[in-house]
Image (spheres, helix red, strand yellow):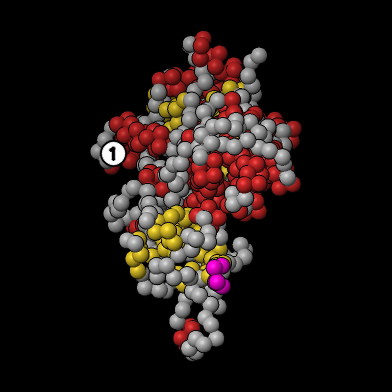
Amino acid sequence: MSRPTFYITTPIYYPNDILHIGHAYSTVSADAMARYKRLRGYDVFFLTGTDEHGQKIERRAAQAKKDPQQFVDEIIAWIKDLWKELDISYDDFIRTTEARHKAVVQKIFQRFLDQDDIYLAEYEGLYCTPDEAFWTERQAPDGKCPDCGRDLELVREKSYFFRMGKYVDRLLKHYEENPDFIQPESRKNEMINNFIKPGLEDLCVSRTTFDWGIKVPNDPEHVIYVWIDALTNYITAIGYLSDEPQERAKFERYWPADVHLVGKEIIRFHTIYWPIMLMALGLPLPKKVFGHGWLLMKDGKMSKSKGNVIDPKMLINRYGLDAIRYFLLREVPFGSDGVFTPEALIQRINSDLANDLGNLLSRTVAMIERYFDGVIPASGNLGELDQDLRQLAVSTVDKVEEAMEKMEFSVALTAIWQLISRTNKYVDETAPWNLAKDDAQRDRLGTVLYHLAETLRIISILIQPFMTRTPAVMWSQLGITEGEITSWESTRRFGLLPAGGHVVKGDVIFPRLDLKAEVEYIDSTTGANNKGPGPQAAPQLTGATNADPGNQVEAKVADEESALITIDDFMKVDLRVAQVTAAEKIEKADKLLKLQLDAGNEQRQVVSGIAKYYTPEELIGQKVILVSNLKPVKLRGVESHGMILAASEGDQLVLATVSADIPNGAKVK
């Protein structure tokens, strides 16, 4: 039986310069959708590429003292390298300078001429060279481009024009009969009210003021303009009017496109001009055009002139591929504008990836190693907590699928992270470290640890469209071989992870980062503020933190005979809420544990004399009180910066903890 097809496209990018993180946002989004559909069993064709002709390229090449072809070739090599670094799984990369594209564009132009859809006339009006867009005085009364704000040029030249008005009624009817054609729906109202209702003017489709482009058939003075040249890439890439039968078969299989994914600034070209051209060719229209929002900086749109451009390669090299893909897809509801800030990026990495997902994996693997010699135990009788976790894991699959069909990437990831959060809570509720102290609870302990490992299996599959490297790392640590139990359909059945497999403790998948240091680094490398390359490797946990003097227990409760202090003395002590993100024993120190703490805006390393009372596993996730302004000390050669508070009585010691709702870094008064 033939698999269903899914054809998705990105905008083809204009290679007048290297791309920034906003361009990566479009392509990563399309890649996530393509990967999701492949996981669901679809025959996917994912197209991206470059729009290489036009006056702007011609001018930039001249400034660089290069031939236009050489100029774009160099930038496109950089773009392809970026897509490789981002794990973009495109099936074809179309270039408008390729022979396969140029030949078909000329055939299409000639057909429009033969049908009297195109005529020759003289044009006089306003033109934006950077955006390659014409505007009327009504649309740009201040003489500035409505899209980019730059000054418009008054141009006058003979051009070929496409009769847009001939197809307007059919276009409006298509909108009415296909309410999901333009997404989000607000974009449809914008197209109708701002461009169609005021009167759709005929479209200029050739230019004579530059040479870098595809020549009009039988009239080489004219160059075919961007609308027909660039927009037709979506059909030339899959073999429309190709001389090769195999290529034409590809067109029959994949057209119409399931979704054109574009930035909101070019949605009118894709929902007005492009559908009308397809109608003139007698071809079906794409099923959906999705105009996503912009990824902005605090001071507005990313721009070289503003010096606020973020280099995606820098981010990938420093923080890792999956951290950047996750941030782009989680931070901004798709379709809306969002703001990129270094603070938001680092907080997502620390909170969602290091604390939530990373700690869940490391805790689970560590406890299976500790309590079952690394062998995944079998599940026994189920309790209410187990049933709840199973139900949430399976229902999360439906939530993710529903969100992905709507291209709501942030919603899908939120659902997955709700499962991760619930699983972390399950650890605290079941307290495996306490079960391990009672031999009679060994079966119960095995059931709990099995549920943790199996839920992680499901999570690892659900994150595959978004994070391309992490799932395989998780499978390696969980002793899973890629195959039937890593398929998308396997997520609907809880309990497929075979007992008896061996876990393998690995490196921390997402190290925590120092917020202040990383924000300063990103700011120093942004656009015109770049002061140098700086270190490129992803930072490792530096652990600049300290505390507890040796085997003394933390901050013993003072007895009644303690000397009195003044309020001024007490105010010198800076107490902060901190969360334990990692814990391990110190070699040859039976009483000491080395703790990594999230203190809000910084990472602390504390050595604490609580090993007799707590195992490392049961400390993960606990919110403790940190004395943050103690001088650093070294204990058994390990640097410690701070002290955590505890209460003791006789042989008992209990850490002072706070509610999970209190944010890390909050001051204790």
Query: Residue at 63% of width from left, 31% of height from top?
Result: 496
Q: Nearer the viewer, residue 9 or 586?
A: 586
Number of marks present in the image shown: 1
**Placement of the C terminus among the 4 image quadrants:** bottom right
Disc 1 marks which amino acid? Ala
- Pinpoint residue 70: horizontal percent, then vertical percent: 29, 31
- Mark 1 neighbour class, 10 Å CA radius: few under 14, some 14 to 19, many 20 or more: few
Q: Nearer the viewer, residue 358 or 519?
A: 358
- Residue sitting at the far left: 65
**SS majority, magenta:** strand
- Pinpoint residue 230: horizontal percent, then vertical percent: 48, 31
- The magenta stretch spans residue 311: no
Task: Work out whether 587 lies above or below 260.
Answer: below
- Pinpoint residue 357: horizontal percent, then vertical percent: 54, 47
Looking at the image, residue 41 sits to the left or right of residue 214; the answer is right
Residue for badge 1: 62
Query: Residue at 42% of width from left, 63% of height from top?
Result: 607
Looking at the image, residue 56 sits to the left or right of residue 495; the answer is left
Res 454 quadrant in image: top right
Q: What element does badge 1 sit on? A: helix
Task: Work out whether 664 lies above or below 297.
Answer: below
- Pinpoint residue 166: horizontal percent, then vertical percent: 65, 30
Query: Residue at 40% of width from left, 37% of height from top?
Result: 85
Task: Work out whether 127 lies above or below 225.
Answer: below
**Placement of the N terminus among the 4 image quadrants:** top right
> Is residue 133 shown to the viewer in this render?
no
Which span of residues is magenta-colored? 648-652
Query: Residue at 51% of width from left, 11% of height from top?
Result: 246
